[in-house]
Amino acid sequence: MVFAIFLGLSYRPLFAQDTILKDLVESKRDNKYCFYPSTLRMINLKQNQAYNELVSGVDKFLIYTLDSAARSDKSYRGISEQYLEAGFDEYATVFGGDMNMSILGKENARNQEYVGYFDQKGEMVVAFYLKGNIPWQKIPTLIQNMNEMDMLDLFDFKDFTF
């Protein structure tokens, strides 16, 4: 009996927390992209080492571009509430001007999980989920080198979904 209660209480944390995001936005998406380390390395056409180091710790990266109904009713903002209830911490929130965004995260023994959304002028809303260990200190260097990088732009494939 005690064992069954323990399993019941610990059941959800044993699985990836991406199901919350999927439940909230799967029916409200224009496109969905799912990346794993191998696919993230494949879009790096010039094999930039800094980029490969950055994505080497990624286990899973989901990106949803949301449809016009989700953009207008702003239902994607419920992502933050649901993940806060699931034990995630608020890392960054910005409202106002041309950009609204929320980034939440959860650290555990094996890896980290991040979830959030970016709303740029209501024209494009992107919700994401990332599982893995990211060396955030390398991002500024990567951004500086982005002009030199030859990357496959998957967002140009508007009619191509996974």
Image: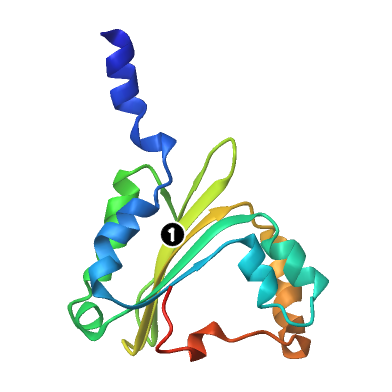
Q: Is residue 86 visible?
A: yes
| Quarter of the image where one finds residue 29 | bottom left
Residue pointed to by mark 1: 115
- Quarter of the figure that contains the N terminus: top left
Instruction: Tell me the kind of residue under disc 1.
Output: Val
In the rendered structure, the answer to whether residue 17 lies left or right of residue 142 reads left
Residue farthest top in this picture: 1
**Residue furthest out toward the right:** 49
Q: Residue 135, how many percent across, how many down? A: 69, 58
Residue 75: give x, y in percent of width and height. 21, 70
Label 1 secondary element: strand
Residue placed most toward the observer, 58 or 80: 58
Q: Is residue 160 left or right of residue 96?
A: right
121 or 57, nearer to the observer: 57
> Which residue corresponds to the image point at 37% horizontal and 42% vertical from the top-left?
87
**Quadrant assignment for the C terminus:** bottom left
Q: Is residue 93 visible?
A: no
Which residue is at a point 29% across and 9% down the rendered structure image? 2
Residue 3 vs residue 15: left or right?
Answer: left
83 is higher (above) or lower (below) than 25: above
Instruction: Between residue 86 and residue 30, name the one nearer to us.
Output: 30
The relative height of residue 35 versus residue 108 in the rendered view (above or below) is: below
